[in-house]
Image: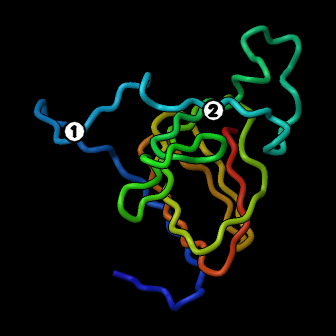
Amino acid sequence: VYFPKEGAITHRAIRTTPPKMSSKSSLKHIPNKYLTVSEPNPIYFGNGMNEAKNPNWTNKNWLKSRFHFSFAEYYNPKNTNYGVLRVMNDDLVQPKRGFGTHPHSNAEICTYVVHGQLTHQDSMGTKESLGPGSIQFMTAGTGIRHSEHNI
C-alpha cells in the first residue's frame, strides 16, 4: 500500500479483467428509471456541436450521465452521498467526444471503463488510453487538471 505525502499528486492505472459474477450477486441493482439523467450541452465541456450529417447524434445525446447521488443540476437533500463517496456517475460518451480540460483538488477519482476506449491526459504529463476492464485511480491532492475523451 502506498500513501502519498499530503498535497502530492499521484496517478495509477490498472488493467484488469472484470471478475466473474456469481448468480447470487451481493451488488444492489438500481434500475435506470430511478437515476437522474443529465444530457448537457456539448459546448459546456469543450466539444463542438454535433455533426449535422449524422442523424443519430443530437446536441443532447453526446453525453448521457446517470447520477447516483446529487450532482451538477440534480439536487436531492436526501441523496447527497454514501459515506465519503460524493459522486458516482454512469457516463455514456459518444465517439470523438469527452470532457475538456478541467480542475480537481482534494479528491480521489476512480474511473472504470466498461466498453470502448477512454483517453486520459493530465497536467502531470500523463497521457494514456484505457480499454474495457481498465481501472484508473487519480489523487488530485492540492490540484490537477485533466481531460477524458472517447477517442
Quadrant the N terminus occupies: bottom left
Kindly identify which residue carries mark 2.
38
Amino acid at the residue labelled 2: Ser
Q: In percent of the image, x 66 and y 66: which residue is there?
A: 104
Q: Residue furthest front?
A: 77
Amino acid at the residue labelled 1: Lys
Determine which quarter of the picture holds residue 29.
top left
Secondary structure type for disc 1: loop
What mark, if any, has residue 70 been given in the picture? none
Q: Residue furthest top?
A: 55
Quadrant the C terminus occupies: top right
Q: Residues within 10 Å of mark 2 (few under 14, many from 20)?
A: some
- Vertical comparison of 94 with 4: above or below: above
The one nearer the camera, 79 or 16, is: 79
Q: Is residue 37 left or right of residue 22?
A: right
- Vertical comparison of 147 with 124: above or below: above
Q: Earlier in the sequence, mark 1 or mark 2?
A: 1
Q: Is residue 116 left or right of residue 52?
A: left
**C-alpha gap between disc 1 and disc 2:** 30 Å
Q: In percent of the image, x 46 and y 31: which residue is there?
A: 35
Q: State yes or no: discs 1 and 2 in contact (Cβ < 8 Å).
A: no
Q: Is residue 25 left or right of residue 136?
A: left
Q: In percent of the image, x 53 and y 32: which residue is there?
A: 36
Determine which quarter of the picture holds residue 142.
bottom right
Kindly identify which residue carries mark 1.
20
Q: Nearer the viewer, mark 1 or mark 2?
A: 2
Instruction: Please state the horizontal and vertical placement of residue 26, each as a whole percent of the image.
Output: 17, 42
Instruction: Please state the horizontal and vertical placement of residue 13, each as a whole percent of the image.
Output: 49, 62
Q: In percent of the image, x 73 and y 64: which residue is there?
A: 103
- Vertical comparison of 70 with 127: above or below: above
Q: Residue furthest left?
A: 24
Secondary structure type for disc 2: strand
